[in-house]
Structure formats: C-alpha cells, structure tokens
Amino acid sequence: MGLAGAPALALMPRKAWAAPPTAAVNTTGLAVTDTEVTVGILHSITGTMAISETGAQEAEKLAIQQINDAGGVLGRKIKIIQEDGASDWPTFAEKAKKLLVNDHCAAVMGCWTSASRKAVLPVFEQYNGLLYYPTFYEGLEQSKNVFYTGQEATQQILAGLDWVHKEKGGDSFYFIGSDYIWPRTSNKIARKHVENVLKGKVVGEEYFPLGHTQFNSVINKIKLTKPKVIFADVVGGSNVAFYKQLKAAGIDLSKQVLMTISVTEDEIDGIGGENIAGAYACMKYFQSIDNENNKAFVAAFKKMWGEKTVIGDVTQAAYLGPFLWKMACEKAGSFDVDKVVAASPGIEFKGAPEGYVKIDENHHLWSKTRVGKAKTDGQFEIVYTSPELIKPDPFPKGYQ
C-alpha cells in the first residue's frame, strides 16, 4: 500500500464495502460512532521540548488528514483530541489518562522523550490503551500497548558508533547529554560498545538539565581532552546554546568529529545551519532522502505547514503511526486494542517516506540506518545508508 503523500493516496484503492456496523468493530467502549473514530495526539507544544515535538504532531495531523481524504478507517473519519504534555512528565501521565479514560481514544500518537514515555506507560498498560511512539530511543523496553516507530539502540547508537569508528578513526569519545533516562542509558550502551567492541576509550562524560544553556565549562574540557569524537545526545532547546557556544569557542566541526543522535532538521531550524555544519547525525530518515515516497511526503508537509518548515527523523516516524494503526485496524476488522495489537506484526508500509518499514513481533520497526552530514542550509548530506533493513533488537545481549 503506497500511502506516503497525497499523490500516493490518490491512487489508493478505496474499499467497495459499506462501513461495518459499530457494534462489530467496537466491543470495548472506545470513542467510535457510525461515522467517526477518535484518536489522541499528545506532545509538548510548550516548554523546552516544543522545538523537537512540534514537527511530530504536525506529521500526525497530515497523516490523519490524508487518511480521512482517502475514506478514513473502517469507513470512519478520524477525529483528533490534542493535549499538551508541556515538557513535563507528570503532565504527560495526567493527559494520557484523560485521553484514555475520559475521551476513550482508540489510539494515541505521542510522547518524545523517554521520560515522558516512561511516565505514560503504566497508564496505557493499566487502561489497555494503544500508544504509537515516534522517537529513536535507548531500547530495553517492550510493551503490548506500545508500537515504537523510531529506532532502538542497535539501529542507531551501535550502528552510528561502528560507522564513526570505521570511517573517521573514532577511538576516543567525549559523551555529552541531557540529564534524564534516554541520554544516560544511551551513553551506558555506547560506553560498553566503545570499550568492549571498538576497544576505544571514553575520555569524558557529562550531563546537563533540560533547558540548560551554559556549556562553556564542558567545552573547555573537550578542548583539553581532545577526543577524536564528541558524542552528543543533548535534546530540545539546549541544543541551540550548545552548538552556538561550540562555534564561539573555536571548535571547527569540519575538523573535530561530532556525532549526534539527537539533532534533526527540526533542531537545526533553531540552532542555525552555520552553527552545526560539518557535524554528523545517525538517524533512519533525513529530509534529503531521494525517493518518490519522500518527495510526495515533503511536498504535502510543506503545503500543509508552510514552505519554510523542515522535516526531521522523529517527524517522519510520527507520520508512520496513523498509517500503521489504520492498516492494523483494517487487517483486524476492528478498533478493539487487543485485536489491533494481534494484527500488527508483519504489517508492511511500502509507502513510508524513509522507503519501507515492517512491524516486528517485538512492536519495533525494521528499517535502515543512515548517517548524514549537516550543511549550512540546515539539511543533511547523506553519507551512509545501511545496505539492508536492520531487524530491531530492543534487548541486545551484553548491553543491558
């Protein structure tokens, strides 16, 4: 099913059958009528994470509009209820409960940070809700109630470290991250890989609170230790200060290798391309991917949200969520969460902007890994693409 972008959707075969009766497709009290099905969108629209999460909710709305334009899901148009997690993890949990208990949403597209996902996970499991989570993350998690449309550690962290070791001689690393579960766990995994597999060393490791803006002290330490690679997983608005201060301190990213697993085109929009040009990012998607699916997606996204908008890795992964949910509902012939979950493994989305994805039994996606080099115009030049899809492995042996 080629579903990426309006042109692909226009060619999508429409169901010839009438919408099945509500009683047949909704046996668990979800917000489903004869004409509508309600889903939730839960992201940070305010606070330090808004710079990263705005694109995700825009992509989810685009996907939902395209699905509705093509006839909806099981003959029903999708109605959206949106909530703001406000970059605050208890707020995410509170809003998730509202969407499931009060609004009876059939599915929720949402969260960005692992802290927000960990906060809402008990809510989704308690109330048997369905979450499509779009962000690359540290792995080490699997839930019946979550589909992870971003990458886990083996598809991003380990693949990125292997590339920078082989291609850039990376044998010494300085880790710098934001102070919460994803950067700390990611760097724990990265350290094991650097020391045990690559036989390199970590010469420094520091963390800073979300929203932190003063990085001069750690930049001075980086200049003193002279690591071959700066490995950065700073998130949100802090990136703006970090990369501007790196440049002001005279660190030339065309000479000093920096690999980030957290900066996408969305963040560069705030950082400024001139402040990060030369840095490498390991992602599964870049806006510059040259295929027909992506061309249609980028055109549709810009038409909806403005020509100046940019599209990053998590934004694309967020776009996948509504389509994967639609396909699972139609395969199951039901909106019931248990039936949708059971129908999901093996579903293929050949119209994905990144090219192709498939849902694994472990609720993660098979996808390719890419490395991009940041340019002054805010886009990435893709310098590496894995030859094959990488099977997701959220519990890699030796890294737990």
Image (cartoon, helix red, strand yellow):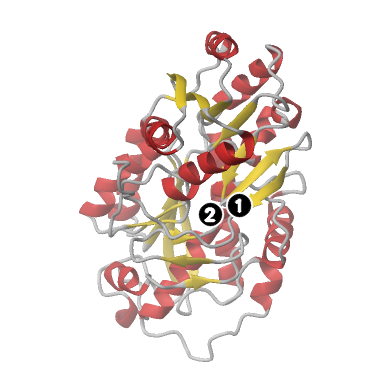
- Compared across the picture, whether 292 is left or right of 264 comes to right
Residue of label 1: 285
Query: Looking at the image, is 362 positioned above or below residue 275?
Result: below
The N terminus - image quarter: bottom right
The residue that appears at 57% across and 71% down in the rendered structure is 350
Residue of label 2: 317
The residue that appears at 40% across and 35% down in the rendered structure is 182
**Residue 225 tag number:** none
Tags 2 and 1 touching, CB below 8 Å = yes
* Residue 398 in sight from this viewpoint: yes
Indicate the amino acid at tag 1: Tyr
Q: Residues within 10 Å of mark 2 (few under 14, many from 20)?
A: many
The residue closer to the viewer here, 245 or 32, is 245
Whole-percent x and y of residue 316?
58, 54
In the picture, residue 238 is in which quadrant? top right
Whole-percent x and y of residue 144?
28, 60
Indicate the amino acid at tag 2: Ala
Distance (Cα) linking label 2 and label 1 = 8 Å
Whole-percent x and y of residue 154?
43, 48
The residue that appears at 56% across and 25% down in the rendered structure is 230
Query: Looking at the image, is 245 positioned above or below residue 201?
Result: above
Query: Looking at the image, is 282 positioned above or below residue 232?
Result: below
In the picture, residue 10 is in which quadrant? bottom right
SS for dot 2: helix
